Amino acid sequence: MLLEIPHLLDPPQLAKLHELLGGARFVDGKLTAGKAARRVKNNLELGLEPTRMGMLVRILMSAMGHNRVVQFGALPHRVSDPIFARYLPGMTYGDHVDDPLMGAGPRLRTDVSMTVFLSAPETYDGGELVVRTTFGETGVKLGAGDAVIYPSSSVHQVAEVTRGERLVALFWIQSYVRDPARRELLYELGLAREHLLDQEPAALTTQYLDRSYANLMRMWCEL
Ligand code: NI
């Protein structure tokens, strides 16, 4: 399941991120790539600056913590530090799957990948995130402040940027539920549950659905 998340960041958050990233130093993205990905990765990434990174992480984590699509769609258990990537004309990232384990300290398993678009789409050409699904390829290019989540196991690429600059933040999430099909089922069931709890909180069908959701979570969640 590929889920788009409109307005993950509000305009003040987006402005602050751009301010913080404006004066930052970017380095060759191959430095953070695994052996296979290194061959196809051609971009720039924010260099190691702990203070700046700390401020960036706080803004993004707060936005993710308050976002219902992220919470219900990804069921996040642990979230990686972000990578901020910059693509200039000629840059691209060919077909790959993301590394299964990430993190310098305690490692997390990557179940869900997240791209937060930071550049307005009209300011650059190309640069679509292309995700291969069972139904074919889906190209994603969203507004500044919007995000998309998709299973880390899916083959994806970033199309070559041919004009302007594509700036994105990337996160990886270890989900309480590692199987994408189960996450999708829980996501839709969770939406139905929310709706019924709002509309008919006392109805027996609401109680049945609420209990089934809780017990499916209990059955499938891993800590
Ligand atoms: Ni990737």
Image (spheres, rainbow, N blue to C red):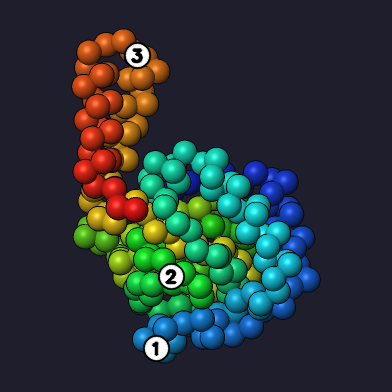
In the picture provided, is 96 more to the left or to the right than 122? Answer: left
Cα–Cα span, label 3 and label 2: 41 Å
Contact (Cβ within 8 Å) of mark 2 with mark 1? no
Q: Mark 1 points at which residue?
A: 35
Mark 3 closeness class: few <14, some 14–19, many ≥20 residues within 10 Å: some
The residue positioned 38% from the left and 47% from the top of the image is: 75
Q: Which mark is residue 201?
A: 3
User: On screen, 170 above or below 184?
Assistant: below
Q: Mark 2 points at which residue?
A: 107
Can residue 144 be spotted in the picture?
no
Front position in the image: 106 or 66: 106
- Percent coordinates x, y for residue 1 in the rendering: 30, 52
User: On screen, 182 above or below 155?
Assistant: above
Mark 2 closeness class: few <14, some 14–19, many ≥20 residues within 10 Å: few
User: On screen, 35 above or below 160?
Assistant: below
Q: Which amino acid does label 3 sit on?
A: Pro
Contact (Cβ within 8 Å) of mark 3 with mark 2? no
Front position in the image: 181 or 49: 49
- Percent coordinates x, y for residue 156 in the rendering: 36, 69
The residue positioned 30% from the left and 28% from the top of the image is: 192
**Labels 1 and 3: the sequence-earlier one:** 1
